[in-house]
């Protein structure tokens, strides 16, 4: 959600973003910022301290907003941020946008969205398999369910954040490019948790792509669809691989150190 806290023409307007800055959240925030831009307000200040999670779509959206206001309205400043979102900008190579921001911690988000799934647990491993609709509303369900499993393992808070980010990127790509945002399509997720590693597989019905070409390093304007997401997944996880047989399957592995 985006909220304009002040719109006094004599002072920079403050825009507070809270919740999840993913594909859906970006669209709603963009509507607010576009109205602000069209109204002639200069140099808005953005508060990201209340953003609980952000994916590559959120990063690119902030970059575009920054460029838009810099070109025509004199600037765009992130004035506060939380550590998880700050680290996301740092690992994606855009920390210059937020280097002057003040850092605030926020309590972890505890909401859970129940889903129906197959779950097996023994002393040595947990195995879970479930499927979700090919809609962006499913991204949070998948992130939270896998984070719940990972939280029972010996991962640090930073590693748990990396896992949640990588999972969000993977399921978002599967829904946008594999399912084509078709809610009748399905993404199947399999999760294996052992004493030394977490293995996540996601399968969609998409035709596949070349992951090496998609993840090449290039400027934002030329970045292929899903490219930044693949780069973030490879940074956050120990192993990332793809299979293209009867759909597209991505495998993410994180080892317990």
Image (tube, helix red, strand yellow):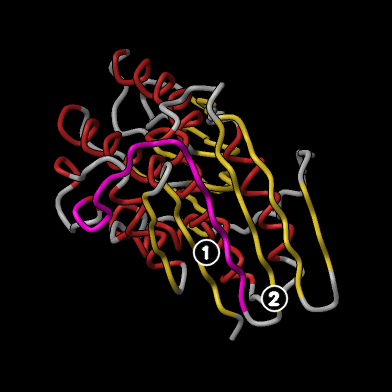
Question: Residue 98's mark?
Answer: none
Determine which quarter of the picture holds residue 86.
Answer: bottom left
The local secondary structure at tag 1 comes to: helix
**Placement of 85 over or under 32, stated as above or below:** below
* Horizontal side, residue 150 vs residue 207: left or right: right
> Around disc 2, counting alpha carbons within 10 Å, would you say few (fewer than 14), some (14 to 19), or many (20 or more)?
some
* Horizontal side, residue 182 vs residue 37: left or right: right
**Residue at x-position 56% and y-position 78%:** 255
Region in magenta: 197-213
Q: Which residue is mark 2?
A: 194
Percent x, y of residue 85: 49, 55
Percent x, y of residue 220: 20, 45
Q: Which residue is mark 1?
A: 162
Q: Nearer the viewer, residue 201 or 152?
A: 201
Percent x, y of residue 88: 43, 58
Q: Nearer the viewer, residue 73 or 134?
A: 134
Report if residue 201 lies within the magenta region: yes
Determine which quarter of the picture holds residue 177.
Answer: top left
> Around disc 1, counting alpha carbons within 10 Å, would you say few (fewer than 14), some (14 to 19), or many (20 or more)?
many
The local secondary structure at tag 2 comes to: strand
Quadrant where the N terminus is found in the figure: top right
């Amino acid at each position: 959600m985006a909220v304009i806290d002040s719109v006094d023409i004599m002072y920079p307007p403050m825009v507070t973003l809270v919740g999840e800055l993913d594909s859906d959240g970006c669209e709603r925030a963009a509507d607010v910022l576009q109205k602000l831009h069209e109204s002639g307000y200069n140099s808005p200040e953005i508060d990201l301290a209340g953003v609980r999670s952000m994916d590559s779509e959120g990063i690119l959206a902030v970059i575009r907003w920054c460029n838009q206001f810099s070109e025509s309205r004199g600037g765009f400043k992130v004035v506060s941020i939380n550590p998880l979102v700050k680290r996301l900008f740092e690992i994606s190579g855009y920390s210059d946008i937020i280097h002057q921001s003040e850092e605030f911690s926020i309590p972890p988000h505890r909401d859970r969205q129940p889903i129906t799934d197959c779950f097996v647990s023994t002393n040595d491993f947990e195995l879970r398999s479930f499927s979700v609709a090919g809609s962006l509303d499913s991204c949070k369900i998948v992130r939270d369910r896998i984070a719940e499993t990972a939280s029972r393992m010996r991962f640090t808070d930073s590693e748990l954040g990396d896992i949640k980010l990588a999972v969000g990127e993977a399921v978002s790509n599967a829904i946008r490019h594999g399912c084509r945002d078709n809610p009748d399509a399905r993404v199947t997720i399999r999760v294996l948790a052992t004493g030394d590693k977490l293995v996540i597989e996601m399968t969609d019905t998409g035709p596949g792509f070349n992951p090496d070409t998609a993840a090449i390093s290039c400027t934002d304007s030329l970045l292929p669809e899903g490219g930044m997401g693949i780069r973030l997944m490879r940074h956050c996880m120990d192993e990332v691989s793809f299979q293209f047989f009867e759909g597209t399957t991505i495998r993410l592995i994180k080892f317990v150190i």
